[in-house]
Image (cartoon, rainbow, N blue to C red):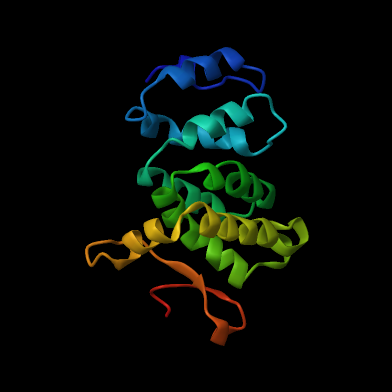
């Protein structure tokens, strides 16, 4: 692995320039080393790292889920707002499954830090960024594994996945 693409400190913008130059197929090799740079979005390297990670495919989702299931609520906020909301719609949809769980059953610390509110914004953003035609094609195919996210009025506006419906 080329360590010149992973920032060595919060001011290592040269590594960020090198990171932008790698192919998306090489990106999964660096997920574990890059995601911690989103723990503080004020670090100069955070946004360029998030920008590059947003080009990833579904193989990023398990790494995102690990963060969303963890205890660092600021990191969760940053990942939702600066990464998940920038992903391609199909990848975003996969990543939103854990986000919906935060909306429906937030911990007290997630409420205190506003993670549940940012999570709700992400789901609303997703619903607006994917046209109804695209959404229909994603969810109506019998071969798809994507989860359609929608509000069930019978559940008092609780977000649910197609599997729960």
Where does residue 99 sit, x and y in percent of width and height? Answer: 55, 60
| Residue closer to the observer: 24 or 135 | 135
Place residue 114 in its image quadrant.
bottom right
Question: Looking at the image, is 23 positioned above or below residue 108?
Answer: above
Instruction: Tell me the quadrant of the picture where the C terminus can be found.
Output: bottom left
| Residue closer to the observer: 143 or 28 | 143
**Residue found at x 62% / y 30%:** 46
Q: Is residue 44 left or right of residue 96?
A: right
**Residue found at x 72% / y 61%:** 109
**Residue found at x 52% / y 60%:** 127
Question: Looking at the image, is 9 positioned above or below residue 52?
Answer: above
Q: Can residue 69 be seen in this view?
A: no
Where does residue 53 sit, x and y in percent of width and height? Answer: 48, 35
Q: In this view, does 96 lie to the left or right of 22?
A: right
**Residue found at x 37% / y 42%:** 57
Instruction: Tell me the quadrant of the picture where the N terminus can be found.
Output: top left
């Amino acid at each position: 692995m080329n360590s010149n693409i992973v920032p060595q400190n919060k001011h290592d913008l040269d590594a960020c320039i090198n990171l932008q130059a790698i192919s998306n197929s090489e990106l999964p090799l660096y997920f574990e080393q890059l995601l911690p740079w989103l723990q503080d979005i004020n670090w100069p390297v955070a946004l360029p790292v998030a920008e590059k990670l947003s080009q990833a495919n579904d193989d990023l989702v398990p790494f995102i889920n690990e963060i969303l299931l963890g205890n660092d609520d600021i990191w969760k906020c940053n990942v939702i707002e600066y990464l998940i909301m920038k992903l391609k719609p199909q990848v975003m949809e996969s990543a939103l499954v854990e986000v919906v769980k935060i909306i429906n059953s937030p911990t007290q610390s997630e409420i205190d830090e506003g993670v549940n509110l940012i999570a709700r914004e992400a789901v609303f953003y997703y619903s607006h960024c994917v046209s109804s035609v695209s959404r229909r094609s994603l969810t109506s195919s019998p071969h798809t594994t994507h989860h359609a996210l929608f509000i069930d009025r019978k559940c008092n506006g609780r977000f649910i996945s197609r599997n729960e419906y």
